[in-house]
Image (spheres, helix red, strand yellow):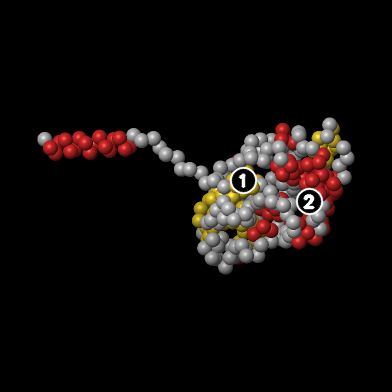
């Protein structure tokens, strides 16, 4: 009888434990950061970008870990020669994202750390579609973007363009103007990411609000039938600032989330234009040189970006 009682009590305790509600893991907390004043704009290295020389991948040996199938692009998770983990992008968004992230970082916005490698062999990688991925000598892959996955940075949920801690601020409005300047037609909330940095520049825990996917840039905006990416000639022909009305700027944007462009003031547009105008022609060239564009493409893209910057600086209203 005593054994039966003990067994019954044990069973009841077990059932009561499993019946407890599931406890969700608490999300990391920190100071939200989207933009930090760039006091050194004129000296920023747009060739190496936010990661600088010290964070570049070790290409002595790069090995395949797994596919990363989310999104439009072909992406592989890989390990470099020093053991660091990277997400690689292998198709025509690799160049655009590398250059675009440098321009966004140049004026103070938080970005991913990335580098473009002109030719790299990835051991154990599957064979991608030949019509989407260019190859190079030694059976390598051409123009591969390496995006850092540091161990001390935790990737959290996406953030929304319409509801976030920076809604209505000139920093967010300036970022929206940047998206139009780059012709980023793929402004899905899923392409944004909050990065938890335990020991940020402020010395405290920070939540970095970044546009994580900038690949759909440097073409023309429009519908799924007309938009393009990584087409310098298309980009150079597109309009940007169409005018002003009621103290608001009208931008020639046609793409996803177009509603967020309707309330940008003249002052906000001039503010981001003023930051961009402090970049030298050499820095603009370096942003596109980092993405392995040809000299002719660099000239087209840098000239088009400079023309759009001038439009912001010269807005009347």
Task: List x then y, in percent, for residue 33.
Answer: 64, 47
In the image, residue 122 lies at what x, y percent? 56, 60
Q: Quadrant of the N terminus?
A: top left
Which residue is farthest front? 203
Badge 2 crowding class, 10 Å Cα cut-off, few under 14, some 14 to 19, many 20 or more, is many
Which of these two is toward me, 228 or 291?
A: 291
Residue 208 x, y percent position in the rendering? 61, 48
Outermost residue, bottom side: 60
Task: Tell me which numbered mark, 2 or 1, is placed earlier along the sequence.
Answer: 1
Q: Please state, as top left, top right, bottom left or bottom right, where the C terminus lies in the image.
A: top right
Specify whether residue 308 is in view. Answer: no
- Residue 64 visible in image: yes
Q: CA distance from mark 2 to mark 1?
A: 22 Å
Residue 272, above or below 54: above
Image height check: is 292 above or below 304?
below
Mark 2 or mark 1, whichever is nearer to me: 1
Using the image, tell me which numbered label, if any, was put on residue 32: 1
Residue linked to disc 2? 275
Residue drawn at 55 percent across, 53 percent down: 198
Residue at image point 76% right, 34% down: 263
Q: Residue at x 69, y 51 (%)?
A: 36
Q: Quadrant of residue 161?
A: top right
**Where is residue 176 drawn, in percent x and y?**
72, 41
Mark 2 residue element = helix
Q: Residue at x 71, y 37 (%)?
A: 168
Q: Quadrant of residue 239?
A: top right
Badge 1, how many Cα within 10 Å: few under 14, some, many 20+?
some
């Amino acid at each position: 009888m005593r054994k039966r009682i003990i067994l019954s009590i044990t069973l009841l305790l077990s059932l009561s434990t499993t019946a407890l509600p599931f406890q969700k893991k608490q999300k990391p907390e920190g100071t939200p950061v989207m933009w930090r004043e760039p006091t050194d704009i004129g000296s920023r290295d747009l060739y190496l970008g936010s990661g600088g020389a010290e964070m570049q991948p070790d290409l002595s040996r790069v090995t395949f870990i797994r596919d990363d199938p989310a999104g439009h692009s072909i992406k592989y998770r890989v390990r470099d020669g020093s053991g660091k983990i990277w997400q690689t992008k292998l198709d025509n968004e690799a160049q655009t994202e590398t250059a675009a992230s440098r321009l966004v970082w140049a004026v103070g916005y938080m970005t991913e750390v990335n580098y473009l490698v002109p030719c790299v062999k990835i051991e154990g990688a599957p064979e991608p579609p030949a019509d989407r991925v260019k190859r190079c000598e030694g059976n390598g892959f051409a123009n591969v973007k390496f995006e850092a996955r540091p161990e001390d940075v935790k990737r959290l949920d996406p953030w929304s363009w319409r509801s976030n801690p920076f809604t209505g601020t000139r920093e967010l409005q300036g970022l929206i103007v940047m998206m139009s300047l780059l012709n980023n037609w793929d402004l899905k909330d899923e392409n944004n990411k909050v990065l938890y940095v335990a020991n940020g520049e402020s010395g405290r825990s920070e939540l970095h609000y970044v546009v994580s996917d900038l690949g759909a840039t440097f073409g023309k905006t429009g519908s799924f039938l007309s938009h393009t990416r990584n087409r310098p000639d298309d980009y150079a022909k597109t309009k940007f600032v169409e005018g002003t009305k009621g103290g608001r700027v009208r931008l020639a944007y046609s793409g996803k989330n177009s509603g967020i462009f309707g309330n940008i003031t003249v002052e906000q547009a001039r503010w981001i234009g003023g930051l961009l105008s402090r970049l030298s022609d050499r820095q603009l060239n370096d942003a596109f040189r980092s993405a392995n564009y040809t000299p002719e493409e660099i000239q087209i893209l840098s000239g088009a970006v400079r023309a759009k910057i001038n439009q912001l600086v010269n807005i009347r209203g």
